[in-house]
């Protein structure tokens, strides 16, 4: 995929934003990490490359922004025969600093294997510290029993958390979090108290009686080979106490299959008071579980939407209000976006239809502003290609009408992202084919006015 792809977006408290993306040249052999900064007074900056010109990136970048406007970008980059993580810090008035490594190809399973680092997520807390969720895939060479040919395969995946300490101005040593297996999945959320919640979709083997087998971090429990099950676990990381024991939050087991794992994909969000919510797809329904910080207890898994759905997303307001959104499949090429609102002390409201088009819709992203308003963005198939759409929730009026925020409906768009500033303004960014290569576009929502015109913020692939 040539050109600019896989954009990521983050805001500070003053309305400034940073977008980073992966950019691949016209040959398809060279790639780099690029960025553009949005200033409320001056608009978008010219895009600039933030990794070294000779660096070869691997996978998507991630970005976070502190309350004072400092940004941190992280990505995986080739070094010899493996990949390591590199970070660059952005300071207002100074620009991007020199990239520095924060991983050294930490080992996973086999010490003789080649290790490939990947970044999953980066989040900044209110005190200026940053947490990075990342991992290493260990690949080893095997010989085919059929013809003796050599091939590489994953032999293990290790998950780590890194912390940038705002007090010392440096990165701490990586914290080993878990060893995960095939089909596993990780997410992370940071609450307003500085706690980090690590969510893992973990597989294990249950015994014949159907009893659940206790799973500790980084370990499978095996009993009687009755078949693999999927378990969703959450661990809490306290910066002063370390990583806590995992807690299973899906009360009933999910039968393992390759197809099933493609749709479970749990997500997690935390509010300012330390409360946590997770949503996932299970057995044709959307399920959720909430954690109360004061009582230190999970409420229990519950079905919040019984129809056949895939891909739930979640976003939290600082006071504990939550929004969940998902796709409802209504035919082979027809899916609609639905959403639900959770209010502490009241529970979940009714499901609301977000788009009413008879077309394929996917790649949802959801964000909540400081007053509890929300915006969902997604891509939706039109006459000949996918375009980017949005719908806004108003705390006084509910959900509005779906609106097209894209440019040129004839060109394919993908990977929409959305974020709010503290003044309830929002920015959405996405990647779009322009006829020659992919490029990054942005559109700004201004509170009280609506969406402005989309604009190009990346350079042409060279």
Image: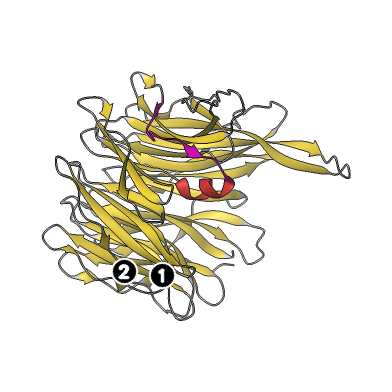
Task: Choose between 412 and 3: the one closer to the eye.
Answer: 412
Q: Mark 2 or mark 1, which has the lower sequence index?
A: 2
The magenta span reads: 246-257
If the image is split into quadrants, where does the N terminus sit? bottom right
Mark 2 crowd level (few <14, some 14–19, many ≥20, 10 Å Cα): many
Is residue 148 toward the left or the right of residue 388 in the image? right
| Magenta residue check for 174 | no
Q: What residue sits 38% from the left and 63% below the top?
A: 378
Residue 127 screen position, x and y as percent: 27, 34
Task: Give 33 or 251, whichever is nearer the viewer.
Answer: 251
Question: Which residue is label 2 attached to?
Answer: 355
Question: In the rendered structure, does residue 255 fall within the stretch colored magenta?
Answer: yes
Q: What is the residue that sits farthest to the top in this orientation?
A: 241
Q: Which mark is residue 380?
A: 1
- Furthest toward the left, the residue is 396
Contact (Cβ within 8 Å) of mark 2 with mark 1: yes
**Whether residue 16 can be seen here:** no
Look at the image and tell me in which quarter the C terminus lies: bottom right
Residue 307: give x, y in percent of width and height: 36, 56
Principal secondary structure, stretch drawn in magenta: loop
Q: Given the current orientation, which residue lies at the most extreme right position?
A: 147
Residue 415: name its quadrant.
bottom left
> Residue 296: x and y, percent?
25, 25
The number of numbered discs placed on residues in the rendered structure image is 2
Q: Position of residue 254 (x, y in %)?
A: 47, 39
């Amino acid at each position: 995929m040539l050109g600019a792809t896989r954009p990521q977006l983050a805001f500070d408290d003053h309305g400034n934003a940073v977008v980073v993306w992966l950019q691949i040249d016209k040959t398809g052999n060279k790639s780099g990490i690029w960025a553009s900064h949005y200033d409320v007074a001056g608009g978008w900056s010219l895009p600039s490359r933030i990794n070294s010109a000779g660096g070869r990136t691997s996978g998507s970048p991630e970005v976070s922004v502190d309350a004072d406007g400092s940004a941190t970008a992280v990505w995986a980059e080739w070094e010899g025969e493996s990949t390591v993580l590199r970070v660059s810090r952005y300071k207002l008035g100074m620009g991007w600093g020199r990239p520095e490594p924060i991983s050294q190809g930490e080992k996973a399973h086999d010490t003789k294997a080649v290790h490939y680092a990947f970044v999953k997520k980066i989040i900044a807390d209110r005190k200026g510290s940053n947490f990075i969720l990342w991992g290493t895939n260990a690949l080893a060479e095997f010989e085919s029993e059929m013809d003796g040919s050599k091939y590489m395969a994953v032999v293990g995946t290790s998950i780590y958390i890194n912390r940038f300490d705002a007090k010392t101005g440096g990165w701490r040593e990586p914290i080993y979090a878990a060893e995960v297996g095939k089909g596993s999945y990780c997410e992370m959320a940071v609450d307003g108290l500085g706690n980090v919640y690590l969510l893992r979709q973990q597989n294990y083997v249950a015994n014949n009686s159907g009893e659940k087998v206790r799973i500790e971090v980084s370990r499978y429990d095996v009993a009687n080979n009755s078949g693999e099950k999927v378990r969703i676990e959450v661990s809490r990381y306290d910066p002063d106490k370390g990583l806590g024991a995992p807690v299973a939050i899906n009360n009933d087991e999910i039968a393992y299959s390759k197809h099933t794992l493609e749709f479970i994909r749990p997500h997690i969000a935390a509010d300012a008071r330390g409360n946590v919510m997770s949503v996932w797809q299970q057995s044709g329904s959307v399920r959720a579980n909430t954690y109360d910080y004061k009582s230190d207890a999970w409420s229990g898994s519950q079905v919040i939407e019984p129809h056949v759905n895939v891909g739930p997303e979640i976003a939290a307001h600082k006071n504990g209000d939550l929004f969940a959104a998902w796709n409802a499949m209504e035919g082979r090429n027809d899916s609609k976006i639905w959403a639900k609102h959770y209010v502490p002390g009241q529970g979940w409201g009714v499901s609301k239809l977000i788009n009413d088009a008879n077309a394929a819709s996917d790649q949802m992203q959801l964000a909540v502003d400081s007053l509890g308003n929300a915006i969902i963005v997604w891509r939706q198939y039109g006459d000949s290609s996918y375009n980017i759409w949005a719908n806004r929730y108003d705390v006084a009026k509910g959900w509005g009408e779906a609106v097209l925020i894209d440019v040129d409906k004839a060109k394919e768009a993908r990977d929409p992202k959305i974020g709010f500033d503290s003044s309830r303004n929002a920015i959405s960014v996405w990647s779009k084919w322009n006829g020659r290569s992919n490029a990054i576009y942005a559109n700004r929502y201004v509170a009280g006015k609506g969406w402005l015109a989309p604009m190009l913020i990346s350079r042409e692939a060279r």
